[in-house]
Amino acid sequence: MSLLESSIQTFSRPADRRVFVPFAALVAVMAAIVVGIAVGPVYIGPGTVLKALFGTASATTEIIVEDIRLPRVLVGAMVGANLAMSGAILQGVTRNPLADPHVFGISSGAGAIAVAGIIFFPEVPFYQVQMVSFFGGLAAGGLAYAMAWRGGVSPARLALAGIAVTSMLTAVISAMLVTSQLSAQIGLRWLIGGLLGRNWEDFWLLLPYFVGGSAVAMAMARQLNVIALGDEVATSLGQHVERTRLALTAIAALLASSAVSVAGLIGFVGLIIPHWGRLLLGNDYRFLIPTSALFGACLLIFADTAARTAFDPRELPVGVLTAVLGGPVFVYLVRRRA
């Protein structure tokens, strides 16, 4: 019996699990942050990490911890949390367990704008490309929603429109990369997704979207519970279905676009993490959204730590590892639904 199964049986009542699981996830995130800071070409023990954070370690150690590893770990945590919350919201809005920011074209929209900026405007600072790509993700999500509109938006049409937008934008990205001779390698690396070189500038760029998006998502969790029951039930309970669905889709797009604008196209986090939360806590989004955020943060920190240390001195883009983890889970979900 695994440790996870043993813990679930110990906390068999849903009320117990809703306390234990988020607490355990929070502890895991804190552990992941410490490991992420400690592990690297130069190992720094947990005690020394704390000394560096309080300004009592050597100058070299403080530079490594405060200027290099800590901002990267914190950016990874917010990227993972944003993608996981976005996936949970989209799966609830569409009642589709295979929905995630990639399926809705949000990630591709941000990616297309970023690749265009890198290739056609190489003189533009990268942080400006990141900011513009954020709006590309929002625009792609809006386009999918508009394409699905027919006096209202059904979950099935929204999912199909998202797939169509993703396909179109993927083709545009491929065309730009194939026809460009300048910086295509940089664009390709960004499309895979990674946290190499992420710093405090990226942290402050992402923080407002993480805090604001999380707060609104939590505030609308009860409405998402009603929407997930189906349009007829939601309407009978007094829910304004279209307005609520549009607001939730916009929040999901904001969370995912901000993550993609900083870290590139990191796949499968938004798909697999909400299912881990449902396995432990059920479908109540008041608990699923915050727990998904913690799981997403934990997963991406550990995955990024492994990606930058497993093949040292070379670094693997973290998007490769999430794809390796998410691929089998995706196949399992498809076979389970078939």
Image (tube, grey):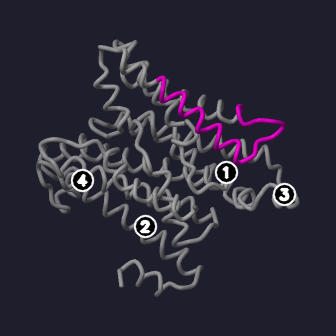
| Cα–Cα gap, marks 2 and 3 | 35 Å
| Cα–Cα gap, marks 1 and 3 | 14 Å
Q: Between tags 2 and 3, which lies in front?
A: 3
Residue 306 badge = 4
Q: Count neighbours of disc 2 (C-alpha within 10 A) and say few if under 14, some if 14 to 19, many if 20 or more.
A: many
* Depth order, front residue of 97/53: 97
Of the image marks 1 and 3, the number of the one nearer the N terminus: 1
Q: Is residue 243 left or right of residue 249?
A: right
Q: Count neighbours of disc 1 (C-alpha within 10 A) and say few if under 14, some if 14 to 19, many if 20 or more.
A: many
Q: Which amino acid, mark 2?
A: Ala
Of the image marks 3 and 4, the number of the one nearer the N terminus: 3
| Cα–Cα gap, marks 1 and 4 | 33 Å
* Depth order, front residue of 185/74: 185
Query: Residue at horizontal 51%, vertical 62%?
Result: 335
Q: Which amino acid, mark 1?
A: Thr
Q: Quadrant of the N terminus?
A: bottom left
| Cα–Cα gap, marks 2 and 1 | 26 Å
Q: Which amino acid, mark 3?
A: Glu
| Cα–Cα gap, marks 3 and 4 | 46 Å
| Cα–Cα gap, marks 2 and 4 | 19 Å
Residue 232 badge = 3
Q: Is residue 78 left or right of residue 91?
A: left
Q: Quadrant of residue 14?
A: bottom right
Q: Mark 2 — residue? A: 25
